[in-house]
Image (cartoon, grey):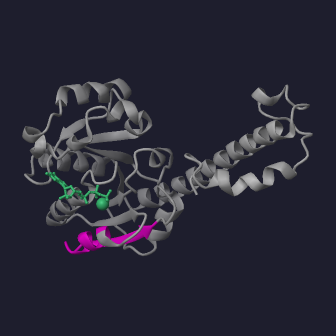
Amino acid sequence: MCTICGCESAQAHAPHTHSHAHDHEHGHHHAHAHDAAASHTGSGDMHTRVLQLEQDILAGNRHMADHVRAHLASQHTLALNLVSSPGSGKTTLLVETVARLKAQQRPVAVIEGDQQTSFDAERIRATGVQAVQINTGKGCHLDARMVHDALHDLPTLPHGVLMIENVGNLVCPAGFDLGERAKVLVFSVTEGEDKPLKYPDMFQAAGLILLHKCDLLPHLRFDVARALDFVRQVNPDAPVIQLSSTTGEGFDAWMRWIDTQCAAA
Ligand SMILES: Nc1nc2c(ncn2[C@@H]2O[C@H](COP(=O)(O)OP(=O)(O)OP(=O)(O)O)[C@@H](O)[C@H]2O)c(=O)[nH]1
Ligand SMILES: [Mg+2]
């Protein structure tokens, strides 16, 4: 269930909304409407209830995320939450990254989130790194409880790195803290320059932005300066690294950033 887009919560709660007495306070925009048509107050009631449900779920998620964060901090484990639209190259990037971390003798494991299939976890395991696949079914994002439960199937990673690949979706994962140190946004040059302005919540939430698939730039009409200007309009602070998993361009900077974050974890 997603309380951000309401994809299931609105449907799940709609049938109950007309069975309640309307003798309690409604939100400000319905305060004048107690004598209005039942359908009007009914929708206000539903709105209030959905908002309350959303707040409860987000508060519950934050609580669980803090628990996950405290557990990881006790092991000095760096957790990164990779977010992006579908197909931006997260798994390809992770395959390259975990191979480098392994070569540096850093403990590393991956949690893979997808609506269906175990394809991505299998791609990680092929590198010899442990991975747990979470299938969200109808869900459009990972939540902290899923990460908490997946950690039971992974070894501890003292002074290591836990990579979490979120469901490919530039909207809902922005609102869910998984207990990570930072959200890493993979923004591929095939997506168009305008994504930071179209999906500002996700770009604002990012602690690092990887401009991915830069090897394709010669073949595309993608204006890097314009894309960076849009990024800066919504997130003035996050570093941006231009990178390609195909050529390895930018990987030195990306691995250095991970090192710095590990030291801080
Ligand atoms: N040219 C180029 N293609 C890439 C690069 N990285 C990934 N790809 C291609 O992009 C496509 C999607 O890659 P994935 O790694 O599966 O992307 P993803 O973000 O994990 O996809 P989902 O998990 O389905 O959201 C594949 O065809 C990759 O080969 C890159 O740096 N350059
Ligand atoms: Mg993937």
Residue located at (74% from left, 46% from top): 49
As drawn, 189 above or below 81: above
Of the pair 262 and 143, the residue shown nearer to us: 143
Tell me where residue 231 appears, x and y as whole percent: 31, 30
Looking at the rendering, which quadrant does residue 217 occupy?
A: top left
> Any magenta on residue 125?
yes
Residue 77 visible in rendering: no
In this image, 1 relative to 240: left or right?
Answer: right
As drawn, 194 above or below 169: above
In this image, 183 relative to 209: left or right?
Answer: right
Residue located at (47% from left, 61% from top): 71
Q: Ligand 2 sits in which quadrant? A: bottom left
In this image, 78 relative to 68: left or right?
Answer: left
Residue 164 visible in rendering: yes
Residue located at (73% from left, 52% from top): 14
Highlighted range, magenta: 120-135
Tell me where residue 72 appears, x and y as whole percent: 42, 59
Of the pair 157 and 127, the residue shown nearer to us: 127
In this image, 18 relative to 50: left or right?
Answer: right
As drawn, 117 above or below 253: below
